[in-house]
Image (cartoon, rainbow, N blue to C red):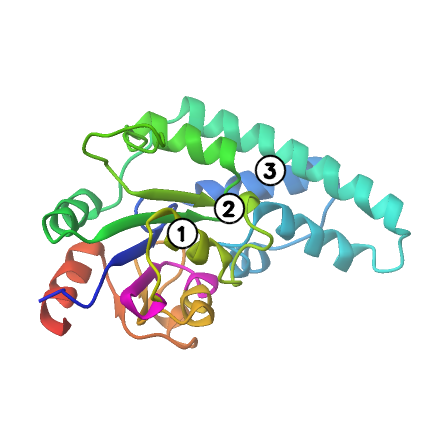
Amino acid sequence: MLQNIEMIVFDMAGTTIKDRNEVENCFLEAVNQTGLATTHEEINSMMGWSKLTVFQELWKKQLPDAPEKDLAKHIEYSYSVFREILESHYLNTEILSAEGSLEIFDFLKKQNIKIALTTGFYRKVTDIILIRLGWNVGLDENYTGTKFINASVSSDQVKAGRPSPYMIFRAMELCNITDVRKVIKIGDTPSDLAEGKNAGCKYSFGITNGTHTKNELEKYENDGLLENLFLFKTHLENIL
């Protein structure tokens, strides 16, 4: 049934990892501490992006005429404060898999379909999350046993994060996938949908129990919006 699909690329926070507005709250705390002005709506519109890129965009908007050197100092300060807040949060707060994550991972393994995670997080915090969940098993290149997931790519490992397609392309390399038309992307943000489309994936799906609602996501090009990963599994069985 799934013979034409070789890999599914999942987002992390808000898709496979429960996000109770934690990432947004970490952004807002860093913003408040470092003198930036923004809103919930503006931060939410950039969810899924590289976290560094978010601060670059916010400071460029707030200080459009600032010299590059001064702008860079503001960006680095806000980003460093954010990193401290974010890492502390994920080191000290319970991390939960999203509804249906473990079930769909198990289903895909039985179908011999590769599982990749891409994220707007940087590598250090990505690893904190994977290790605390036990999802890092098998990511060591020398590991020969059963892998929990097949690949993990963070935004700082490629030349541009979402909505650019490079994290998907890197995941394909790691999983020895050569045809992007045999790849499916799913995530909970507009940038996830665009990442899949820009990569040329067979399908780019949205999940609506994360950071964005169905009403918010349906404005963007997509191949289907699902309420949770349980329904995504059913959808895969029906269409493929």
Q: For this view, does 15 lie left or right of residue 228?
A: right
Residue 138's place in the image compared with 43, above or below, is above
User: Residue beneath label 2, please?
Assistant: 24
What is the C-alpha distance between the residues marked 3 and 1?
36 Å
Magenta residue check for 41: no
The answer to which image quadrant residue 157 occupies is: top right
Q: Which residues are magenta?
A: 180-192
Amino acid type, label 1: Glu
Disc number lying in front (2 or 1): 1
**Residue at the spot x=63%, y=46% of the render?**
52
The residue depicted at 22 percent of the width and 46 percent of the height is 101
Q: First in sequence: mark 3 or mark 2? A: 2
**Residue marked by disc 3:** 29
Left or right: residue 194 compared with residue 72:
left
Q: Answer whether residue 183 is magenta in the image.
A: yes
What is the total number of numbered labels drawn onto the structure image?
Answer: 3
Q: Residue at x 36, y 66 (%)?
A: 180
Looking at the rendered structure, the kind of residue marked 3 is: Glu
Mark 3 surroundings within 10 Å by alpha-carbon count, few (fewer than 14), some (14 through 19), many (20 or more): some
Residue 173 is marked as: 1
Is the residue under label 2 in contact with that under label 3 (CB below 8 Å)?
A: no
Residue 26 image point, x, y percent: 54, 38
